[in-house]
Image (cartoon, rainbow, N blue to C red):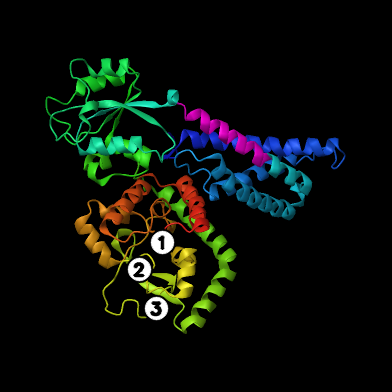
């Protein structure tokens, strides 16, 4: 993993992004050379040709990201890559053609764009097939040792062994501390007749993960861990391991000292001003683009049952302040006739016919742009919850109120990473993603969340 503006990004994704940008720029130059050789276009490249090539590559890459091609869960097959690559290339080609048509100085021959899009698609498909087959080789696996043998060690090792992640780990074993119940395979317990550094060196271990709840006492190998670190072996705590690999701040392995003295959780005035400017710019652009959809949605909702179009509901915002969130009404007027708030459920019978469609496409969230403009919400942030549920969750879930240290958002990191929540257990999982966002939030992460939101809308993930 590499850390870019406080956000962990896979080295594989970073490498793919750079390689594919260069490959697409090369594709458009190659298309120009081929067509000029046959006399279809002028052999002289315009002075703005590189700007056209750069725009083409960025639009294609953005479209690929919107179709989830940079959200690698495991290593996708060639067929699955092709299924998403072809429509993303078409979307990228269309976006590029429209953009270049609006700027005559950058206008490129449409035949060059067609050939470059086709050729670039084939090149990327071949490159990804070769790269995915290469990195799947066992020799490229990272070797790990876990210190501890209890519940936390088991959870960390399960994460390392999870095949849905593109990075592969080989678990050498577990160093027992005899201070907690052994919940890992006894066959994986490492012998204590030699030092931790000797074991790590013999097994070519690159990282040691300290996954013990209790780090005190004579059995904790503090000096051995220091020896390993001084000799170039990475030593990582369980909280940092989860943050890096799962993009979560785990509440069950979190200590207040880590929150206070660790990096992140920076809410400086500069960051607040930049985020506000970003919110206003994105909100105005999306509001203008979505206006026809919003007007049509409002008309359909009214015609279905003649009820109110906009639904106002109290939510908890920054600092625990209550505000009214605006949404297109997607449920019956008597959805909560008893007066008690209810979690939304899959195939909720309270949802109207139009409501099912707009919830699936997330159109019901669009009126919240008004909340963003008023300053009650950000475009990206933890989703605001109702006071009734906040009171319950604050009592039952540690650190839940930390998510109220920043403004809530229309979309959020938890929304693009986890399905719709409808229980305390779901709330804990989403909180762990929200805490990661609160700790590492910035414009870079906001842009990534917006791109992943497009993927969620395109594939209707997690909606109810």
Q: Point out the frontmost of discs 1 and 3.
A: 3
Q: CA distance from mark 2 to mark 3?
A: 22 Å
Q: Is residue 199 left or right of residue 271?
A: left
Whether residue 170 appears in magenta in the rendering, the answer is no
Q: Is residue 100 above or below residue 210?
A: below
Viewer can see residue 58: yes
Helix, strand or loop for disc 1:
loop
Asked whether 185 or 102 is in front, the reply is: 185
Q: In percent of the image, x 31 and y 16: which residue is there? A: 201
Asked whether 360 or 439 is in front, the reply is: 360
Circle 2 residues within 10 Å: few <14, some 14–19, many ≥20: some
Q: CA distance from mark 1 to mark 3?
A: 26 Å
Q: Is residue 70 left or right of residue 226?
A: right
User: x%, y% of residue 141?
Assistant: 41, 27
Q: Are marks 2 and 3 in contact (CB under 8 Å)?
A: no
The residue lying furthest to the right in this view is 39
User: x%, y% of residue 84?
Assistant: 57, 48
Q: In percent of the image, x 23 and y 26: which residue is there? A: 187
Q: Which residue is mark 1?
A: 377
Number of numbered callouts drawn: 3
Q: In percent of the image, x 26 and y 58: which residue is there? A: 424
Helix, strand or loop for disc 3:
loop
Q: Are marks 2 and 1 in contact (CB under 8 Å)?
A: yes
Q: Is residue 412 left or right of residue 398?
A: right
Q: Which residue is mark 3?
A: 332
Q: Quadrant of residue 120?
A: top right
Q: Which residue is mark 2?
A: 323
User: x%, y% of residue 198?
Assistant: 27, 15
Q: Point out the frontmost of discs 2 and 3.
A: 3
Image: magenta residue range:
120-137
Q: Earlier in the sequence, mark 1 or mark 3?
A: 3
């Amino acid at each position: 993993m590499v850390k870019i503006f406080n956000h962990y990004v896979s080295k594989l994704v970073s490498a793919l992004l750079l390689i594919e940008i260069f490959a697409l720029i090369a594709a458009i130059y190659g298309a120009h050379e081929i067509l000029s050789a046959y006399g279809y276009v002028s052999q002289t490249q315009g002075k703005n040709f590189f700007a056209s090539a750069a725009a083409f590559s960025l639009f294609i890459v953005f479209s690929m990201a919107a179709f989830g091609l940079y959200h690698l869960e495991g290593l996708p097959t060639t067929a699955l890559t092709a299924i998403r690559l072809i429509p993303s290339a078409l979307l990228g080609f269309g976006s590029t053609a429209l953009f270049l048509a609006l700027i005559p100085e950058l206008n490129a021959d449409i035949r060059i764009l067609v050939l470059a899009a086709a050729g670039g698609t084939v090149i990327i498909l071949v490159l990804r097939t070769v790269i995915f087959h290469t990195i799947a080789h066992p020799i490229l696996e990272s070797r790990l040792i876990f210190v501890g043998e209890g519940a936390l060690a088991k959870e960390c090792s399960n994460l390392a062994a999870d095949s849905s992640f593109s990075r592969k780990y080989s678990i050498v074993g577990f160093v027992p501390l005899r201070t907690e119940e052994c919940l890992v395979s006894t066959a994986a317990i490492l012998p204590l007749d030699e030092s931790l550094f000797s074991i790590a060196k013999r097994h070519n271990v690159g990282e040691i993960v300290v996954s013990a709840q209790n780090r005190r006492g004579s059995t904790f190998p503090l000096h051995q861990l220091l020896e390993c670190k001084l000799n170039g072996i990475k030593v990582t705590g369980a909280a940092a391991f989860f943050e890096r690999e799962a993009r979560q701040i785990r509440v069950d392995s979190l200590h207040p000292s880590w929150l206070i003295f660790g990096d992140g959780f920076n809410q400086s005035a500069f960051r607040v001003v930049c985020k506000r400017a970003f919110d206003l710019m994105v909100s105005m652009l999306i509001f203008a683009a979505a206006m026809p959809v919003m007007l049509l949605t409002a008309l359909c909702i009214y015609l279905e049952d003649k009820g109110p179009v906009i639904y106002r509901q109290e939510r908890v915002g920054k600092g625990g302040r209550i505000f009214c969130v605006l949404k297109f009404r997607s449920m019956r007027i008597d959805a909560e006739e008893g007066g008690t708030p209810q979690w939304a459920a899959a195939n909720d019978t309270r949802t109207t016919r139009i409501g099912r469609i707009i919830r699936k496409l997330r159109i019901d969230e669009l009126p919240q742009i008004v909340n963003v403009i008023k300053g009650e919400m950000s475009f990206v942030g933890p989703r605001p919850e109702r006071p009734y549920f906040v009171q319950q969750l604050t009592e039952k879930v540690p650190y839940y109120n930390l998510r109220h240290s920043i403004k809530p958002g229309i979309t959020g990191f938890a929304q693009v990473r986890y399905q719709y929540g409808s229980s305390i257990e779901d709330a804990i999982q989403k909180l762990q993603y929200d805490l990661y966002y609160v700790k590492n939030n910035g414009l870079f992460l906001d842009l990534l969340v917006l791109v992943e939101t497009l993927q969620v809308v395109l594939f209707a993930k997690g909606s109810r």
